[in-house]
Amino acid sequence: MAEFVVLGAGMVGVSSALALQAHGHSVTIIDRTQAGCETSYGNAGIIQMEAVQPYALPRDLLTLCKYALEISNDVTWRMDGALQMLPALWSYFRHSSPAKHAQISQYYSRLIRSSTADHAGLIRDSQAEHLISRDGLAILLRDQKEFDKTAKKADFLLNEYGVTSRILDGGRYQKEEPALKKTPAGVVHFTQSWSCASPGDLTRAYFDLFVSRGGKFVSGDANTLQQSASGWQVHTDEGELSAEQAVIALGPWSPEVLKRFGYRIPMVYKRGYHGHYDAPQRLKRPFLDVANGVLAAPMTKGLRVTTGAALVPHNSPVDTKQLERGAKALNEIIDVGERVAEPQWVGTRPCMPDMLPLVGEAPNHKGLWFHFGHGHQGFTLGPTTSALLMDMMNGECSELISALSPELRLS
Ligand SMILES: Cc1cc2nc3c(=O)[nH]c(=O)nc-3n(C[C@H](O)[C@H](O)[C@H](O)COP(=O)(O)OP(=O)(O)OC[C@H]3O[C@@H](n4cnc5c(N)ncnc54)[C@H](O)[C@@H]3O)c2cc1C
């Protein structure tokens, strides 16, 4: 019998499994597909040291109207999606007040600040160095007023959280980034963030490291999880698998699986898309085109363009208008090239309304651990919150541990 079964082989599940293994436990990962095939595959690949404040829901009327009318490309929505998520959205709205957001950011920034250090050892041990660039993330502003605002925010992030950046006028940045064919108003270059040329491959490299250290993987469906006399049991392709303890790391699918155990977990499901393009000139570093709500990142498959949030029901059909609008607008400033032919990728950011991942033991089930809800930064935070999960399992207490605790947040 394994001591631990980890359900979910995304960045969060694989990082949990590696952390458990490092603490001497025998671990089996279960997933219905392969490692790093879902959200941890299709994201923008940034290890986001600049993201010390989680994304709050804007509360000013003008931005909300822009979202409601889909004037901005940042957010699209459907009435049925918004209605399904209404309690979670309302809670998100309440947690986004300036005072609450500032308090949440104090915890969030502590997680973010360890992220590159927590990835570094895994990158080295999994021999994934070739996938990583340590050249930061550029925030590109087309409008002078927006540039001034972002530069001011960068100043605040430096003073408050030690986030370093370079503030460059458009002409200067264009000299550094020859792929730019038009001069933007300016760029804020966050220098501590890293980027990954293939997030799915990095997750798989970590997974291979786990296997090389004696870890086991079995295909199976997390929906068959049951409590048993000796702990937990899951039906897998290799029969019933038992473990003393189970970790739920199923990203956006976690709340659905936990319904059977009586947990009603509010989540804001922010869908995103990506497409690859055969841009003739490789970007020096990824950039966010703020005016159009898309991020362009040089990846192994070409230029990956990722979109903002679509608030739609979990299984609603693909609607690529955000991606198409974004790629068209990007083409004004860089040569995007032709779209690479491949099935349309769609994934969902698993966002908790209070913007913090849910990490810790289930309130009503001993030996069942929650580890999900990493929202916009799960690729960044997988190894960091895994280390905290170990602290929790070892009975440690801290203010940060309490802030992530399911027991305190779901009551
Ligand atoms: C467009 C986009 C861009 C993003 N960009 C970034 C970024 O630049 N940086 C960053 O840090 N984050 C980014 N994110 C967020 C990040 O991708 C997620 O937070 C992170 O991947 C979540 O990881 P996870 O391991 O929790 O979930 P996942 O990677 O989704 O893993 C969950 C696993 O559970 C498995 N599973 C689900 N249901 C079952 C079941 N019933 N039985 C068995 N297995 C099951 C799935 O197969 C999957 O392997 C982005 C997200 C999107 C959508």
Image (tube, rainbow, N blue to C red):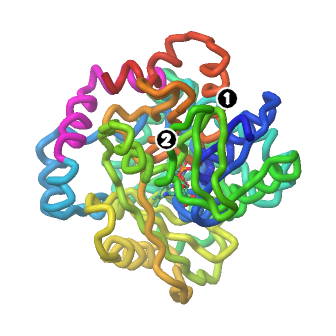
397 w.r.t. 51: above or below: above
- Relative placement, left or right, of 383 versus 293 is right
- Measured as percent of width and height from the top left, residue 145 is found at 31, 48
Q: Amino acid at mark 2?
A: Phe
Mark 1 burial class by Cα count in 10 Å: few <14, some 14-19, many 20+: some
x then y, percent, for residue 17: 70, 41
Mark 1: C-beta under 8 Å from nearest atom of ligand 1: no
* Left or right of 44 in this view: 309: left
**Residue bearing the label numbered 2:** 372
Query: How many angstroms separate mark 2 from mark 1 (CA)?
Result: 14 Å
Foreground of the two, 289 or 273: 273
Q: Residue at x 44, y 69 (%)?
A: 346
| Chain part drawn in magenta | 86-107
Which residue occupies the foreground of this view, 215 or 84? 215
Residue 385: tell me if it is visible.
Answer: no
Q: Within 8 Å of ligand 1, the CB of disc 2?
A: yes
- Around disc 2, counting alpha carbons within 10 Å, would you say few (fewer than 14), some (14 to 19), or many (20 or more)? many
Label located before the other in sequence (2 or 1): 2
Label 2 SS: strand
Image quarter where the N terminus lies is top right
What residue did someone put label 1 on? 387
Q: Image quadrant of residue 356?
A: top left
Q: Is residue 167 magenta?
A: no
Quadrant for the C terminus, please. Answer: top left
Dot 1 falls on a residue whose secondary structure is: helix
Is most of the magenta stretch helix, strand or loop?
helix
The answer to which quarter of the image holds residue 340 is bottom right
Q: Quadrant of the rendered structure where residue 233 is?
A: top right
Residue type of the residue flagged with mark 1: Ala
